[in-house]
Image (cartoon, helix red, strand yellow):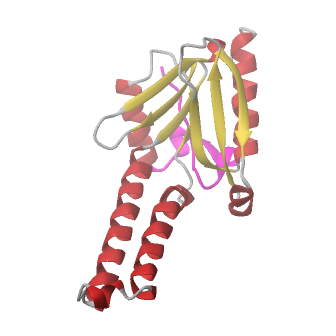
Amino acid sequence: MKRTTIVNASEGAAGAATAADAAPTATSLATLLSRHILRDGEVVILLLKPSPFFILLTSLRFVAVVALLVTAIFLFDINDRFHMNTVAVIEAGIFIAAGRLMWATLQWLARLYVLTDLRVLRISGVFNVHIFDCPLRKVARTRVLQSTRDRLLGVGSIEIIPVADDEPEAVWQTIAKPRLVHEQVVATINKAKQGGSL
């Protein structure tokens, strides 16, 4: 029998609730995980999505470059030299920036972070699903990564480093309340390594 604990990404680790108390959408997601990813008897400790700030932060640089290019077109009168329609240039810039934001939204929707009593997982990918799967006993260390911008927004990332050098590292990117989540991840890893049950 699988037991699932659901965590709302905006509430972080403090918002944990059992599957019986979870909203129907969260329960259906947990059911999907149970059928396709989880093993028999595996207990889900955390089920997180990135903060919605993920959409903005992953798009910010691209949108800034587009804004600079549109501004440069007007500053250097490139639109007059090449007989470009002013409205069309602005609309093209908005369209390109909106396209990048839509792509970031799709990435956000497809991304999921899962901590069980046996493994740590990251599920991502819009067209092709990529799954990072590392047993807790094989996690060498974890750490919280927070830039100044992340601190201002109350988000951060958790880096997961496996013991084996040939295995890839993973990052739970743009997590709300990252220090609380990290504490729970570390506690779960320590229990798994000590052979304790949750």
Does residue 118 appear to the left or right of 106 in the view shown?
right
Question: Which residue is farthest front?
Answer: 81
Please tell me how many numbered marks the rendered image carries: 0
Residue beneath the point at 44% across and 51% down: 108
| In magenta stretch: residue 36 | no
Residue beneath the point at 41% across and 27% down: 34
| In magenta stretch: residue 8 | yes
Quick check: 123 above or below 192? Answer: below
Q: Nearer the viewer, residue 132 or 37?
A: 132
Quick check: 170 above or below 195? Answer: below
- The image quadrant of residue 186 is top right
Residue 46 appears in the picture as rendered: no
Q: Position of residue 90 (x, y in %)?
A: 34, 84
Q: Position of residue 83 (x, y in %)?
A: 23, 89
Does residue 183 appear to the left or right of 83 in the view shown?
right
Residue beneath the point at 44% across and 42% down: 27
Q: Position of residue 145 (x, y in %)?
A: 71, 42
Residue 12 appears in the picture as rendered: yes
Question: Which residue is farthest top?
Answer: 195
Residue beneath the point at 44% across and 34% down: 123
Magenta part of the chain: 1-24
- The image quadrant of residue 37 is top left
Considering the image in quadrants, where does the C terminus appear? top right
- The image quadrant of residue 93 is bottom left
Does residue 168 appear to the left or right of 32 in the view shown?
right
Q: Nearer the viewer, residue 29 or 49?
A: 49
